[in-house]
Amino acid sequence: MHLSKKCSVFKVVLSALLIVALLQLFYLSFLSKFHGNQQRYRYSELFGGSEGKKNGHPEKNSRKERLRFSLSTGGIFDNSGQYRVYKNLIKSDFTTNHKPGSIPSSHVLALATHTTINNLHHLESLVERWHNPLSVAIFAHGQDVKFATALVYALSFFCPQIQSLVDFHLVCLSGEMASFPEQDREHFAGLEDCASVFSRLETHRDKYKNYAISGNVSYPNNLLRNVARGGTESSYILVIDIDMMPSADLHQQFEAMILGRETASDEVFVLPAFEIRHARKMPGNKAELVQLYQVGEVRPFYEELCSRCQAPTNYSRWVNSHVRGSEPLEVGYTLTWVDPWEPFYIGPHTVPLYDENFKQYGFNRISQACELHIAGYKFSVLSSAFLVHRGFKIQGEFHAKKDEENKRNRVLFRSFKEGLKTKYPSSNRRC
Ligand SMILES: *[C@@H]1O[C@H](CO)[C@@H](O)[C@H](O)[C@H]1NC(C)=O
Ligand SMILES: *[C@@H]1O[C@H](CO)[C@@H](O)[C@H](O)[C@H]1NC(C)=O
């Protein structure tokens, strides 16, 4: 009697547990089905035909139509005829809503950068820090052309910050064409929000390191810099590599500085460039940077590979002044260019373009700095703004052909300098 009572209590508890377990299972299967439907819905929203969702998101559909339109133009060839350029493949809301000529005051300074899809994942933190207009030129070839088109579209579709601020330009080989990713569904399934697009990009990260692109294809860095620059209407432009990070609040501080200042068209504003040990948190202001600098976690950019290339910035002078970081941004000191300085700077929209003959490794930025010098520019170093490159650049991590490319570009640089003599006959400066 006693025993069977215990037994039936046990049975009741057991059945109750079973029922709960069954309900759980039922709930889980319902959830996953629901999630699957949602994914399919997201997918067709993104890439499906416009007849898919009639009452869907009209402005998102028009985004797709605009992409289709820019693809249908077939782009334009660059001066060499070797590359096809889709300028404004995807326009930000900012650019769409601001017609040329009516530059609003918030459009004093834009950031311009260039990359392949292998480094596009850096865009996430860059946009987060910059949160102002940004112009990105992407180079892709072969299979990557379609992949780049799809991912850039997905980024502008799912990421509100990117949608509102980032203009994308696509450059590929002239023999290749970009198209809307109508087919290839399996590549793009699972893209359902901003985070999922960035994790897809993560899987492509570092596939090619530092210009080592497969198939003997040259990375046209200077063409890309010009395309990115040409994609913005702002009065001043900062051109950086995509794996660099500007100091926090640079846009707002620079704007305040420039509005309270006589503007000179022959002045550029240098941001001292540093590199930071991997896995360290990016410093936001000068005080944080200097702290890391003093313990060796941050050092001058390219210190190991070419310390002379940045040394003219005069790091010791810069590091030892304006450290509090609470003062408004100003010009710390002004320098004349010396060989082989390769500064990063904010320049007026009108500075000479980069020479597009330079591709791959070597002399691509220095040639332009040299031209600025001969054209009469002065280099004013900003008191507390800076750039930080992610990771230390070290010997041996570069691709096999680096030295060969450097040699080829050295020859090119010599003839480039000859060309400057005829371009600026009255200049008495040399480099
Ligand atoms: C790579 O391209 C260069 C110039 O475009 C050419 O001289 C060279 O032979 C090519 N190498 C291979 C392995 O195709
Ligand atoms: C850097 O600046 C200091 C002045 O703060 C000067 O004494 C020094 O000569 C400069 N160094 C270089 C390499 O120009």
Image (cartoon, rainbow, N blue to C red):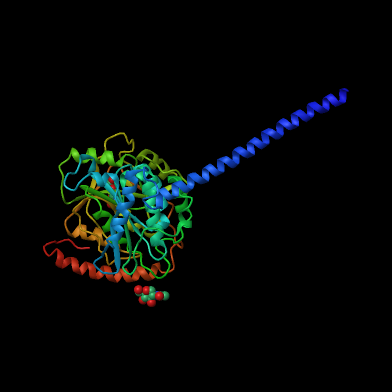
Along the viewing direction, whichever of 142 and 415 lies nearer the viewer: 142
Q: Is residue 128 positioned above or below 186 on the image?
A: above
User: Farthest residue in the right direction?
Assistant: 1
Q: Position of residue 140 (x, y in %)?
A: 37, 62
Q: Quadrant of the C terminus?
A: bottom left
Left or right: residue 86 versus residue 197 is left
Q: Nearer the viewer, residue 173 or 27?
A: 27
**Res. 118 visible in picture:** yes
Q: Position of residue 272 (x, y in %)?
A: 32, 48
The residue lying at 48 percent from left, 47 percent from top is: 39
Q: Is residue 299 visible?
A: no
Image coordinates of residue 19 in percent, x first then y, are: 69, 33
20 or 126: nearer the eye? Answer: 20
Residue at x-position 46% and y-position 49%: 191
Q: Is residue 65 left or right of residue 392?
A: left
Residue at coordinates 33% horizontally, 70% vertically from top-left?
A: 175
